[in-house]
Image: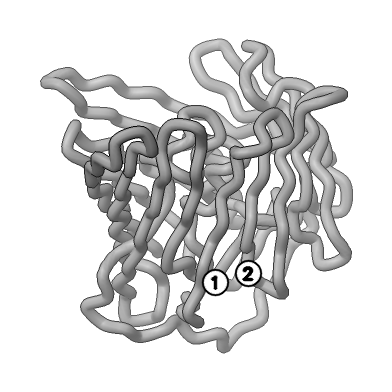
Protein backbone atom coordinates (compact mmCIF):
# COMPACT_ATOMS: atom_id res chain seq x y z
CA UNK A 1 0.00 0.00 0.00
CA UNK A 2 2.05 2.79 -1.30
CA UNK A 3 1.87 6.02 -3.23
CA UNK A 4 -1.40 7.62 -2.27
CA UNK A 5 -0.65 7.36 1.44
CA UNK A 6 0.43 10.58 3.10
CA UNK A 7 2.44 8.88 5.85
CA UNK A 8 4.55 5.99 4.72
CA UNK A 9 4.31 7.43 1.24
CA UNK A 10 3.53 4.25 -0.44
CA UNK A 11 0.28 3.56 -2.00
CA UNK A 12 -2.08 3.73 -4.86
CA UNK A 13 -3.38 2.18 -7.73
CA UNK A 14 -4.48 -0.08 -10.53
CA UNK A 15 -4.35 -3.25 -12.78
CA UNK A 16 -3.56 -4.60 -16.29
CA UNK A 17 -6.77 -4.31 -18.17
CA UNK A 18 -8.32 -7.58 -18.99
CA UNK A 19 -11.13 -5.51 -20.43
CA UNK A 20 -9.97 -2.11 -21.53
CA UNK A 21 -13.54 -0.87 -21.13
CA UNK A 22 -14.01 2.60 -19.71
CA UNK A 23 -16.77 3.35 -17.27
CA UNK A 24 -19.75 5.28 -18.51
CA UNK A 25 -20.69 8.75 -17.32
CA UNK A 26 -24.45 8.47 -17.81
CA UNK A 27 -25.76 9.98 -14.60
CA UNK A 28 -24.69 13.30 -13.20
CA UNK A 29 -23.94 12.72 -9.48
CA UNK A 30 -26.74 13.98 -7.23
CA UNK A 31 -26.02 15.12 -3.64
CA UNK A 32 -28.24 15.28 -0.56
CA UNK A 33 -28.15 18.02 2.09
CA UNK A 34 -25.13 16.38 3.76
CA UNK A 35 -23.07 16.61 0.56
CA UNK A 36 -23.28 12.84 -0.07
CA UNK A 37 -23.77 11.40 -3.58
CA UNK A 38 -27.06 9.48 -3.61
CA UNK A 39 -27.56 8.14 -7.16
CA UNK A 40 -24.55 5.83 -7.51
CA UNK A 41 -23.51 2.48 -6.04
CA UNK A 42 -22.08 2.35 -2.51
CA UNK A 43 -18.68 0.87 -1.67
CA UNK A 44 -19.33 -2.11 0.62
CA UNK A 45 -15.89 -3.76 0.67
CA UNK A 46 -12.31 -2.74 -0.06
CA UNK A 47 -9.70 -5.50 -0.08
CA UNK A 48 -5.94 -4.83 -0.30
CA UNK A 49 -3.66 -7.79 -1.01
CA UNK A 50 0.13 -7.74 -1.17
CA UNK A 51 2.99 -10.14 -0.47
CA UNK A 52 2.69 -9.56 3.29
CA UNK A 53 -1.01 -10.30 3.71
CA UNK A 54 -4.47 -8.81 3.28
CA UNK A 55 -6.50 -5.90 4.65
CA UNK A 56 -10.30 -5.97 4.32
CA UNK A 57 -12.63 -3.07 5.13
CA UNK A 58 -16.41 -3.59 5.15
CA UNK A 59 -18.78 -0.60 5.12
CA UNK A 60 -22.34 -0.24 6.49
CA UNK A 61 -24.78 2.55 5.58
CA UNK A 62 -28.09 3.93 6.80
CA UNK A 63 -31.23 4.10 4.67
CA UNK A 64 -30.06 7.45 3.24
CA UNK A 65 -26.77 6.01 2.00
CA UNK A 66 -24.61 7.61 4.70
CA UNK A 67 -21.79 5.58 6.23
CA UNK A 68 -22.55 4.63 9.85
CA UNK A 69 -19.84 2.05 10.58
CA UNK A 70 -16.92 0.17 9.08
CA UNK A 71 -14.86 -2.83 10.14
CA UNK A 72 -11.24 -3.28 9.09
CA UNK A 73 -9.57 -6.68 9.42
CA UNK A 74 -5.84 -7.05 8.79
CA UNK A 75 -4.20 -10.44 8.38
CA UNK A 76 -0.42 -10.23 8.36
CA UNK A 77 2.35 -12.57 9.52
CA UNK A 78 -0.09 -15.14 10.85
CA UNK A 79 -1.97 -12.71 13.10
CA UNK A 80 -5.34 -10.99 12.72
CA UNK A 81 -6.27 -7.52 13.96
CA UNK A 82 -9.77 -6.04 13.73
CA UNK A 83 -10.87 -2.42 14.22
CA UNK A 84 -14.42 -1.06 14.16
CA UNK A 85 -15.19 2.54 13.21
CA UNK A 86 -18.41 4.37 14.12
CA UNK A 87 -19.54 7.44 12.19
CA UNK A 88 -21.88 10.01 13.77
CA UNK A 89 -23.48 12.69 11.60
CA UNK A 90 -24.47 16.10 12.96
CA UNK A 91 -25.13 19.61 11.69
CA UNK A 92 -22.03 20.48 9.61
CA UNK A 93 -20.01 18.04 11.69
CA UNK A 94 -19.11 14.35 11.36
CA UNK A 95 -17.29 12.30 14.01
CA UNK A 96 -15.45 9.10 13.08
CA UNK A 97 -14.48 7.18 16.22
CA UNK A 98 -12.54 4.02 17.01
CA UNK A 99 -11.33 2.60 20.33
CA UNK A 100 -12.00 5.83 22.22
CA UNK A 101 -10.20 7.98 19.64
CA UNK A 102 -12.04 10.31 17.28
CA UNK A 103 -11.56 12.43 14.17
CA UNK A 104 -13.94 15.40 13.97
CA UNK A 105 -14.71 16.75 10.49
CA UNK A 106 -16.16 20.27 10.20
CA UNK A 107 -18.07 20.98 6.98
CA UNK A 108 -19.30 23.99 5.01
CA UNK A 109 -21.58 23.58 2.00
CA UNK A 110 -21.01 19.83 1.98
CA UNK A 111 -17.19 20.02 2.02
CA UNK A 112 -14.78 19.30 4.86
CA UNK A 113 -13.01 22.52 5.85
CA UNK A 114 -11.25 21.47 9.06
CA UNK A 115 -10.35 18.32 10.98
CA UNK A 116 -9.22 17.63 14.53
CA UNK A 117 -7.90 14.38 15.96
CA UNK A 118 -8.25 13.48 19.64
CA UNK A 119 -5.14 11.30 19.30
CA UNK A 120 -3.05 14.04 17.65
CA UNK A 121 -2.70 12.18 14.35
CA UNK A 122 -2.03 13.36 10.80
CA UNK A 123 -5.35 15.19 10.49
CA UNK A 124 -5.16 17.06 13.77
CA UNK A 125 -5.88 20.78 13.24
CA UNK A 126 -5.81 20.52 9.45
CA UNK A 127 -7.48 23.02 7.09
CA UNK A 128 -8.88 22.01 3.67
CA UNK A 129 -8.95 24.42 0.70
CA UNK A 130 -10.83 23.91 -2.59
CA UNK A 131 -10.91 25.43 -6.07
CA UNK A 132 -13.99 26.74 -7.90
CA UNK A 133 -14.80 23.17 -9.00
CA UNK A 134 -14.88 21.95 -5.37
CA UNK A 135 -11.68 19.95 -5.89
CA UNK A 136 -9.19 19.75 -3.03
CA UNK A 137 -6.16 21.97 -3.67
CA UNK A 138 -4.46 22.19 -0.28
CA UNK A 139 -4.19 20.50 3.10
CA UNK A 140 -2.64 22.93 5.59
CA UNK A 141 -1.24 21.00 8.56
CA UNK A 142 0.30 23.93 10.44
CA UNK A 143 1.76 27.35 9.66
CA UNK A 144 4.53 25.88 7.48
CA UNK A 145 3.61 22.36 6.35
CA UNK A 146 1.07 21.62 3.65
CA UNK A 147 0.21 19.26 0.80
CA UNK A 148 -0.86 20.86 -2.50
CA UNK A 149 -2.87 19.29 -5.33
CA UNK A 150 -2.77 20.28 -9.01
CA UNK A 151 -5.72 19.53 -11.29
CA UNK A 152 -6.14 19.67 -15.06
CA UNK A 153 -9.90 19.53 -15.52
CA UNK A 154 -11.08 16.37 -13.76
CA UNK A 155 -7.58 14.86 -13.57
CA UNK A 156 -5.37 15.09 -10.49
CA UNK A 157 -1.91 15.54 -12.01
CA UNK A 158 0.42 16.39 -9.13
CA UNK A 159 0.77 16.21 -5.34
CA UNK A 160 3.56 18.15 -3.63
CA UNK A 161 4.54 18.26 0.03
CA UNK A 162 5.97 21.56 1.29
CA UNK A 163 8.40 19.97 3.72
CA UNK A 164 10.51 18.46 0.92
CA UNK A 165 11.37 19.95 -2.46
CA UNK A 166 11.75 16.43 -3.82
CA UNK A 167 8.49 15.07 -2.41
CA UNK A 168 6.39 15.39 -5.56
CA UNK A 169 4.16 12.75 -7.12
CA UNK A 170 3.18 13.17 -10.79
CA UNK A 171 0.21 11.30 -12.25
CA UNK A 172 -0.16 10.31 -15.93
CA UNK A 173 -3.38 9.39 -17.76
CA UNK A 174 -4.49 7.89 -21.08
CA UNK A 175 -8.23 8.58 -20.93
CA UNK A 176 -9.53 5.70 -18.79
CA UNK A 177 -12.55 6.59 -16.66
CA UNK A 178 -15.01 4.74 -14.44
CA UNK A 179 -18.50 5.02 -13.08
CA UNK A 180 -18.44 6.22 -9.49
CA UNK A 181 -14.87 6.75 -8.30
CA UNK A 182 -11.55 5.12 -7.43
CA UNK A 183 -11.60 4.84 -3.59
CA UNK A 184 -7.85 4.81 -3.04
CA UNK A 185 -7.39 8.24 -4.62
CA UNK A 186 -8.43 9.76 -1.30
CA UNK A 187 -5.58 8.07 0.58
CA UNK A 188 -3.33 11.06 0.02
CA UNK A 189 -5.58 12.88 2.52
CA UNK A 190 -5.19 10.07 5.04
CA UNK A 191 -5.22 6.31 4.65
CA UNK A 192 -7.69 4.00 6.39
CA UNK A 193 -10.35 6.68 6.91
CA UNK A 194 -13.60 4.82 6.11
CA UNK A 195 -15.62 8.05 5.92
CA UNK A 196 -13.38 9.41 3.16
CA UNK A 197 -13.25 6.08 1.32
CA UNK A 198 -17.07 5.87 1.32
CA UNK A 199 -17.73 9.57 0.65
CA UNK A 200 -14.65 11.15 -1.02
CA UNK A 201 -16.87 13.95 -2.37
CA UNK A 202 -16.81 15.43 1.15
CA UNK A 203 -13.08 16.11 0.61
CA UNK A 204 -13.25 17.08 -3.07
CA UNK A 205 -11.59 13.81 -4.10
CA UNK A 206 -14.31 11.81 -5.87
CA UNK A 207 -12.22 10.98 -8.95
CA UNK A 208 -13.47 8.93 -11.90
CA UNK A 209 -10.33 9.61 -13.98
CA UNK A 210 -8.01 6.61 -13.68
CA UNK A 211 -4.24 7.16 -13.63
CA UNK A 212 -1.93 4.87 -15.60
CA UNK A 213 1.22 5.84 -13.75
CA UNK A 214 2.49 7.72 -10.70
CA UNK A 215 6.11 8.85 -10.67
CA UNK A 216 8.08 10.16 -7.70
CA UNK A 217 11.72 10.62 -6.76
CA UNK A 218 13.59 11.36 -3.55
CA UNK A 219 17.21 11.36 -2.47
CA UNK A 220 17.26 7.54 -2.27
CA UNK A 221 14.79 6.07 -4.76
CA UNK A 222 13.06 6.72 -8.03
CA UNK A 223 9.59 5.16 -7.92
CA UNK A 224 7.28 4.31 -10.80
CA UNK A 225 3.84 2.86 -10.10
CA UNK A 226 1.88 1.39 -13.01
CA UNK A 227 -1.88 0.80 -12.76
CA UNK A 228 -4.33 -1.38 -14.65
CA UNK A 229 -8.04 -1.96 -13.99
CA UNK A 230 -10.99 -4.27 -14.43
CA UNK A 231 -14.63 -3.19 -14.20
CA UNK A 232 -17.98 -4.65 -13.20
CA UNK A 233 -20.91 -4.78 -15.64
CA UNK A 234 -21.97 -1.24 -14.66
CA UNK A 235 -18.54 0.30 -15.19
CA UNK A 236 -17.42 0.58 -11.55
CA UNK A 237 -13.80 -0.36 -10.81
CA UNK A 238 -13.79 -3.97 -9.66
CA UNK A 239 -10.05 -4.42 -9.27
CA UNK A 240 -6.95 -2.36 -9.57
CA UNK A 241 -3.43 -3.74 -9.71
CA UNK A 242 -0.49 -1.57 -8.74
CA UNK A 243 2.99 -2.62 -9.84
CA UNK A 244 5.60 -0.48 -8.10
CA UNK A 245 9.21 -0.38 -9.27
CA UNK A 246 11.82 1.17 -6.98
CA UNK A 247 15.21 2.12 -8.37
CA UNK A 248 18.02 3.09 -6.01
CA UNK A 249 19.86 6.13 -7.28
CA UNK A 250 23.25 5.19 -5.82
CA UNK A 251 23.63 1.78 -7.49
CA UNK A 252 20.67 1.47 -9.93
CA UNK A 253 19.37 -1.65 -8.16
CA UNK A 254 15.66 -2.21 -8.70
CA UNK A 255 12.92 -4.10 -6.89
CA UNK A 256 9.26 -4.58 -7.74
CA UNK A 257 6.19 -4.96 -5.53
CA UNK A 258 2.61 -5.74 -6.56
CA UNK A 259 -0.53 -4.71 -4.69
CA UNK A 260 -4.05 -5.71 -5.74
CA UNK A 261 -7.07 -3.63 -4.71
CA UNK A 262 -10.50 -5.24 -5.02
CA UNK A 263 -13.75 -3.29 -4.65
CA UNK A 264 -17.32 -4.48 -4.08
CA UNK A 265 -20.21 -2.11 -4.88
CA UNK A 266 -23.94 -2.35 -4.16
Decide: is 105 above or below 197: above
Label 2 secondary element? strand
Task: Judge by depth and name the residue closer to the eye, 1 or 83.
Answer: 1
Residue 214 visible? The answer is yes
Q: Is residue 10 left or right of residue 255?
A: right
Residue shown at 60% from the left, 50% from the top: 66
Q: Is residue 187 above or below residue 13?
A: above
Q: Position of residue 162 (x, y in %)?
A: 73, 34
Give the crowd class for mark 1: few <14, some 14-19, many >=20 residues within 10 Å.
Answer: many
Rendered image: mark on residue 209: 1
Q: Quadrant of residue 48?
A: top left
220 left or right of 132 in image: left
Quarter of image, res 143: top right
Q: Residues within 10 Å of mark 2 (few under 14, many from 20)?
A: some
Colouring method of the image: one colour
Mark identifier at residue 192: none
Count of labels shown? 2
Where is mark 2, residue-wise? 155
Q: Please tell me which residue lies in front, 266 or 264.
A: 264
Proximity of marks 2 and 1: CB atoms separated by less than 8 Å: yes
Depth check: give the residue in front, 186 or 63: 186
Residue at the image point whose x is 17% and y is 38% from the top: 51
Q: Secondary structure at mark 1?
A: loop
Tell me, yes or no, if residue 62 can be seen here. no
> Which quadrant is home to the C terminus?
bottom left
96 w.r.t. 2: above or below: above
Q: Picture coordinates of residue 223 (x, y %)?
A: 40, 47
Q: Indicate which disc, 2 or 1, sits on the residue closer to the N terminus.
A: 2
Residue under the point 59% across and 72% down: 39
Give the Cα separation between the discs numbered 2 and 1: 6 Å
Residue beneath the point at 72% across and 74% down: 153
Residue 38 % position (x, y)? 62, 66
Amino acid sequence: MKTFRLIGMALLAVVMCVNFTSCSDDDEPSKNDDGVITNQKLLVELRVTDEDGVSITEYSYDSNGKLVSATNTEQYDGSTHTSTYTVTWGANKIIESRNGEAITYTLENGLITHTSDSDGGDLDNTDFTYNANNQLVKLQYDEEDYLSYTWQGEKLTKMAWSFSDEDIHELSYSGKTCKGYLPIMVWSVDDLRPLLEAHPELAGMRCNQLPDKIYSKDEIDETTEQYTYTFDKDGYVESCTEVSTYKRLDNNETRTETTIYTFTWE
